[in-house]
């Protein structure tokens, strides 16, 4: 996995705070010495440099950042095998999911049970699954939301998702054998940027 060290300048931080950008950090955790919590906190510190903050969990297990900043910094976290993904946004609540893409014996059973949309390929399955996972992470309901109630339009130009309507969109990023799904409001104004750590 390629490692790129990135530090955010004050100019980039100010632009980020005032836009609808979502930053997704991809962290290689293949070395046993990697402390995931320290990595997450060091990334958050890039955005809240001069503010007190802590990473907390709501009663439903959803992580949130408690800080002295006047704007909320939304967070979503996911991991699969050796990859940890942290999504951050000052603009809106977000959800992120990462999965290692490989054949698994339960794919057909899950597709038949939970997905209404046609699943033709392995990537169709992972796109539908990670989209749903990232969607339910936005409000922290987890899998308490019935997967069948989630509407998906994977035939459109953009991957749209929601319960009553297509209220959100999902942006995908793949690298090596991993697929990341980032769920955000269905708006033209927001975008996703990826960083390696």
Image (cartoon, helix red, strand yellow):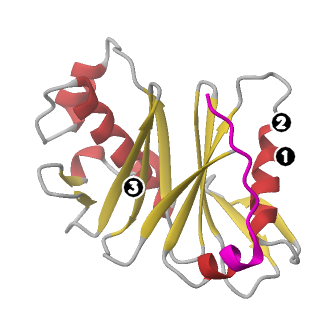
List the residue tagged with mark 1.
Answer: 38
Q: Residue at x 72, y 66 (%)?
A: 65
Q: CA distance from mark 1 to mark 3?
A: 26 Å
Q: Looking at the rendering, which quadrant does residue 17 occupy?
A: bottom right
Q: Nearer the viewer, residue 47 or 138?
A: 47
User: Which percent across, then down, holds residue 110?
Assistant: 27, 27
Relative to residue 171, is residue 129 depicted above or below?
above
Q: CA distance from mark 2 to mark 1?
A: 5 Å
Relative to residue 161, is residue 178 depicted above or below?
above
Name the front one of labels 3 and 2. Answer: 2
Name the front one of labels 1 and 3. Answer: 1
Q: Are marks 2 and 1 in contact (CB under 8 Å)?
A: yes
N-terminal of the two: label 3 or label 2? 2
Numbered badge on residue 135: 3
* Quadrant occupied by the N terminus: top right
Q: Residue furthest bottom?
A: 70
Q: Residue at x 48, y 56 (%)?
A: 95
N-terminal of the two: label 1 or label 3? 1
Relative to residue 69, is residue 146 depicted above or below?
above
List the residue tagged with mark 2.
Answer: 35
Q: CA distance from mark 3 to mark 2?
A: 27 Å
* Residue 8 is a magenta residue: yes
Q: Which residues are magenta?
A: 1-13
Q: Secondary structure at mark 2?
A: loop
Q: Secondary structure at mark 1?
A: helix
Question: Alpha-carbon neighbours of circle 1 within 10 Å: few (<14), some, or many (≥20)?
Answer: few
Q: Secondary structure at mark 3?
A: helix
């Amino acid at each position: 996995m390629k490692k790129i060290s990135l530090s955010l300048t004050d100019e980039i931080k100010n632009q980020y705070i005032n836009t609808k950008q979502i930053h997704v950090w991809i962290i290689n955790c293949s070395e046993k010495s990697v402390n995931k919590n320290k990595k997450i906190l060091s990334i958050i510190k890039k955005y809240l440099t001069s503010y007190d903050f802590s990473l907390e969990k709501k009663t439903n297990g959803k992580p949130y950042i408690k800080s002295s900043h006047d704007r909320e910094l939304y967070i979503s976290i996911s991991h699969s095998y050796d990859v940890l993904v942290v999504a951050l946004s000052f603009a809106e609540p977000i959800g992120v999911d990462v999965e290692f893409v490989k054949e698994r014996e339960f794919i057909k059973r899950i597709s038949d049970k939970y997905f209404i949309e046609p699943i033709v390929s392995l990537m169709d399955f992972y796109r539908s699954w990670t989209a749903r996972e990232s969607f339910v992470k936005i409000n922290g309901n987890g899998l308490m939301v019935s997967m069948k109630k989630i509407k998906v339009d994977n035939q459109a130009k953009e991957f749209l998702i929601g319960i009553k309507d297509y209220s959100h969109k999902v942006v995908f990023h793949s690298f090596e054998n991993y697929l990341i799904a980032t769920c955000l409001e269905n708006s033209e104004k927001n975008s996703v940027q990826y960083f390696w750590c």
